[in-house]
Amino acid sequence: MKTKAIASTEAQNNFGRILNDVIKNNTRYVVKRHHLPQAIILSLDDLEQLLVNHSEQHKMAQIIRDLTPVYHLGETITSE
């Protein structure tokens, strides 16, 4: 199972090719918009496996955690 990241514009321009890759090769696509992950494209068979297979659920959860940006507000000021 491969997971690829793709920009939303590229996904839009190549949607047919992406669908073929998803269906024939069980590839998952994380679609990014403004460099941030927004959606995942996966096959129905893959979704079914995610719903019943705990190992696959954990793998997908880790992928989502790894792709989720961490925001830090402000900067640390050290006192002298």
Image (spheres, rainbow, N blue to C red):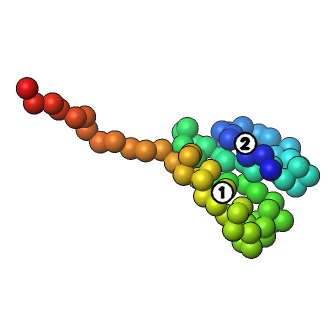
Residue carrying label 1 = 60
Which residue matches tag 2? 4
Label 2: state its secondary structure.
strand
Q: Is residue 29 visible?
A: yes
Looking at the rendered structure, the kind of residue marked 2 is Lys
Question: Is 38 above or below relative to 53?
Answer: above
> Closer to the camera, 42 or 53?
53
Residue 20 on image: x %, y %:
89, 49
* Residue 5 placement, left or right of 65: right
* Residue in view at x 88 percent, y 55 percent: 23
Looking at the image, residue 54 lies above or below residue 13: below
Amino acid type for the residue under numbered disc 1 = Met
Horizontal side of 42 relative to 68 (left or right) equals right
Measure the C-alpha gap from mark 1 to mark 2. Answer: 12 Å
Q: Position of residue 4 (x, y in %)?
A: 72, 42
Mark earlier in primary sequence (1, 2) = 2
Report crowding for label 1: few under 14, some 14 to 19, many 20 or more residues within 10 A (C-alpha): some
Q: Could you tell me which residue is drawn at 65 percent across and 46 percent down? A: 31
Q: Nearer the viewer, residue 42 or 61?
A: 61
